[in-house]
Amino acid sequence: MVVDVKPKIVENYSESNVKRLITRFNNAKAIKDMWLSTFEECYEFALPQRESFYSESIGRRRSDRIFDETAVVGVQEFASRLQSGIVPNYARWADFVAGTEIPKDEQKDVNLELDQVSLPPKLLESYKENVSKAGVVVGKNFDKFLFNGKTLPKNRLVLELVRHVAALDDVETLADLKEVFPDNFWSKGKETTRNRNAFIVELEAVAAEKNARFFGKDDDKIQLRSGEVAVVNSQWGDDNLRYLLDNISYIFLEFFLYVYI
């Protein structure tokens, strides 16, 4: 015989919707709490590095019951497969379109602008292919990328990306460019003021004063509508380029939402 021991929901329909929602939450939590010991045991064998369901002291060893790596490795591989199937890296898995708040007669133009939010699919495919096949010659990585019909090394790829954004109608100042290319993207999300090259795009005078390394030829400088002259950091490796490409689409989205909403 099966005995139902789940907590019963006792709702008072004379109460406000908020109180009834809290009651439902507490009921659901009570049911979940009945499984905590099972969840904890699963974590101990498959995810020992994750935070426990119970309170534990910092630095406590949690892998003393693991004698085989099958479960630990299996969970990580399964999570990677889920991600690659739902939101794969370096692939355009979603498109942004104008919402109902945008007037119908403006939606077509807005959609064309939003199409630039995600990096061009050919660029992303080229990046993924080149990273997986990267070779090293005398300590230099010779990755090449295709963008706007040009074959580019990684540092010139960044220069062309910045040029592409600087040409947009709504980009007038260096501050506008830094909205899309924040300084900390070069340092993989970390804030730092010690490195003279801790920027993606900067005023020419500021970069020169820092004695930073940037694309300094006249043809590589970017003349902004504000009259400012911007230059692009020329120092790029696999890690910070990967970080830039992983995050730039999200920043593009934020920028365009600010412009159009």
Image (spheres, rainbow, N blue to C red):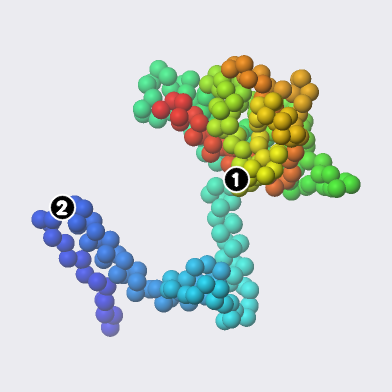
Where on the picture, by quarter, is residue 35?
bottom left
Q: Tell me residue 28's x, y (percent).
A: 30, 64
Label 2 sits on a secondary structure element that is loop
Q: Residues within 10 Å of mark 1 (few under 14, many from 20)?
A: few
Question: Which dot marks residue 191?
Answer: 1
Position of 217 relative to 247 (above/below): above
Marks 2 and 1: which is nearer the front?
1
The one of 195 and 242 positioned closer to us in this rendering: 195
The outermost residue toward the right is 138
Q: Tell me residue 108's x, y (percent).
A: 46, 21
Residue under label 2: 16
The one of 95 and 218 positioned closer to us in this rendering: 218
Question: Which dot marks residue 23?
Answer: none
Q: Is residue 30 left or right of residue 87?
A: left
Residue drawn at x 60%, y 34% is: 181
Quadrant, the C terminus: top left
Q: Amino acid at mark 2?
A: Ser
Residue drawn at x 59%, y 28% is: 177
